Amino acid sequence: MIKSKKRIIVPSVLAVGIFIAIYYLFDPVDFSFPQCVFYKLTGWECAGCGSQRMFHSLLHGDIAMAWHYNAAILIATPILVTMAIAGALRHQKPRFYNVMYSQWVIWSIVGGLMAWWILRNLL
């Protein structure tokens, strides 16, 4: 059992580390990072537009610029990290997992992101 957990945890931590290093070292504004297909097709920003630039700014400690690029994802990031932790600890902390993955939390996140998606294109 421990060996199988290491097979999942080690590559996952390595992948997250590589992801963070890439977004720390390379500014998505200056490099050809993947671009939003929805934006290219419609000219409207999706709920995630600006999240790559937001993450880069956040890694460099520029919270104001991160907020400017995508406030909703900036707010959602700690919630999503907490959900990932709850998922990883679901067997040790089942009550924590049940709260974080309750319908209320899931629908609140979905509703918030949908509202952000609509409002950012109207304003």
Image (spheres, helix red, strand yellow):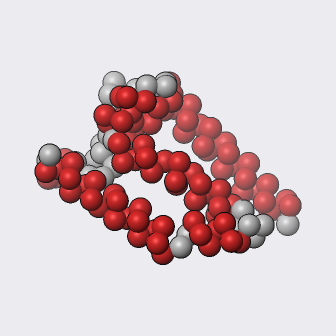
Q: Nearer the viewer, residue 108 or 43?
A: 108
Residue at the bottom extreme, as displayed: 103
The number of discs equals: 0
- Residue at 67% in and 45% down: 13
Image location (x, y in percent) of residue 29: 32, 28
The structure residue drawn at horizontal position 45% and vertical position 51%, both measured from the top left corner, is: 76
In this rendering, is residue 73 above or below 5? above
Can residue 96 be seen here? The reply is: yes
Residue 14 image position (x, y, % from top left): 67, 42
Along the viewing direction, whichever of 10 and 101 lies nearer the viewer: 101
- Tell me what residue is drawn at x 49 percent, y 25 percent: 61
What residue is at 72 percent from the left and 62 percent from the top?
89
Q: To which quarter of the image does residue 62 belong?
A: top left
Asked whether, in this view, residue 21 is left or right of residue 69, the answer is: right
Question: Where residue 44 sits in the image (x, y, percent)?
Answer: 17, 49
Quadrant position of the N terminus in the picture: bottom right
Visible in this render: residue 34?
no
In the displayed structure, does residue 65 sit left or right of residue 39?
right
Would you place residue 30 above or below residue 77 in this image? above
Along the viewing direction, whichever of 12 and 89 lies nearer the viewer: 89
Left or right: 89 as drawn, with respect to 109: right
Q: Position of residue 59 (x, y in %)?
A: 51, 30
